[in-house]
Image (tube, grey):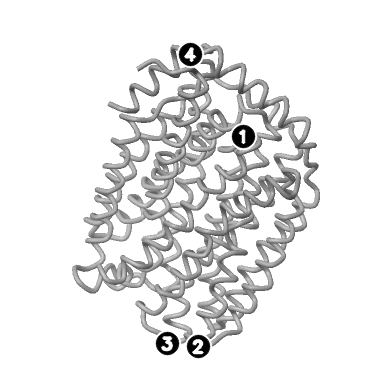
Amino acid sequence: MNLAPAAAARPYRWIVLLLSWAAFTMTAVDRSTWGPASVSVGEHLGVSLAGLGVFATGYYIGYVISNACGGVLTDWIGGRVVLSSTLFAAGGFMILFGEATSVALGIAFQACIGVFAGCDYSAGVKLISQWFRPANRGFALGVFMTATSLGTVIANAVVPSLIEASGWRASYHVFGIASMVVAVLCFVFLRNGTETVTQPRRLPRLGPLLRNRDLVFLGLAGFGGLWGTYGFITWSNALMVKGSGISPVEAGGVVAVFAVVAVVAKPLIGIVTDRFCGGRRKMPAVFVLGSFVVTLLLFGTADSLTAYLWIAPFLGIAAYVYSPLMVALIPQLSGVPLAGSAAGVTNAFWQLGSTAVPVVVGVVFQSTHSFLAAFATLAAGPLLGMLLMLAVREPRPDYRDKAASSSHDRQMHSSAGLTSSITQGAGK
């Protein structure tokens, strides 16, 4: 089937978005499974409440390493191979964690899950940046970033019931197999953008990225944001169960409400900033991070299921919608050719917050037995992120977007044969 370049490119970009989003969703589910499963795993393996944070930290250490390396691999060999192969391996280690019989083995498997789960983010950002014009990139990346919140929704809606019916091991087996299936679909149907195909493969030069002060500040600001977001995801279930005496199923419901609102809010924030803010992301991100601080402190003062359910939607919006705003800034600051590496390097900074916060919050709660003290510790992260975001110098989106859109048009119109074969390959 022979299609004109523009006609072939426009429909296929939605396949790229769908598959990138599906892969990112599965690794988000894999990561979020630990929250509702942690108490059961700890009881089975004989781990104290404070010790549960070490499992999450093991995961995030691997995740940080793979983010730093995965972006470089994506710019070098393309998003398709990186996305599909690493997701398949992450699913395999999910299954192995479900068979763990000791604390040391469990931590090692969690670290391996993190090592392979961290590459799909930078690969997805690269693929979307290649296939979507800057004028539509806020919406596309907003949809892509719903994966993190949807993963939390799925895990908290499914895992408690799976544990009651079949034990905690079943949840890791089920989601591990699902991850491997999605990986195979990505390998079969995904195609790299024309830039990766038409240019020779070379290791990207990271010097310009490391000297880019705005990317550095963006990375540090994301550290603070993810400190709050993934600290909440990791600890909220256990803190509500131990601190307020509600059931694990009720706690899972609260976290599911927290996350489900972000599934709608993330694309909406992309549309709003694309159409009504002139493509600017910095000040909306500052406002959202400030709201995150307030809602975390409000949640920390609550002491009943009803209060948690009232605050959870507002906390969920604040805890998630800053991320698509920050991600949309990355290709603006780095340029599309280095978007994978920039996404990986900045997210490595971001995930350092996820790495440190589980242990810190565990120690704070263990020593103080204070629900509010634990959530004040979480709120310190987005407060730092808000202050650092003010130091980011946002480029003028009108000039950059026009130039990038023209480049994108030339790229698509110069590759008729390639886009035609892509469309045919996607339909096989």
Q: Amino acid at mark 4?
A: Ala
- Mark closest to the chain's N terminus, 4 or 2: 2
Q: Which residue is mark 2?
A: 304
Q: Amino acid at mark 3?
A: Gly
Q: Which mark is residue 342?
A: 1
Residue at image position (30%, 73%) is 43
C-alpha separation, residue under disc 4 versus residue under disc 3 = 62 Å
Q: Amino acid at mark 1?
A: Ala
Q: Which residue is mark 4?
A: 416
- Mark closest to the chain's N terminus, 4 or 3: 3
Q: Which picture quadrant has residue 285?
A: bottom right
Label 2 crowd bin: few (<14), some (14–19), many (20+), radius 10 Å: few
> Is the residue under label 3 in contact with that under label 4 (CB below 8 Å)?
no
Position above or below: 330 against 299? above
> Is the residue under label 2 in contact with that under label 4 (CB below 8 Å)?
no
- Mark closest to the chain's N terminus, 2 or 1: 2
Q: Which residue is mark 3?
A: 245
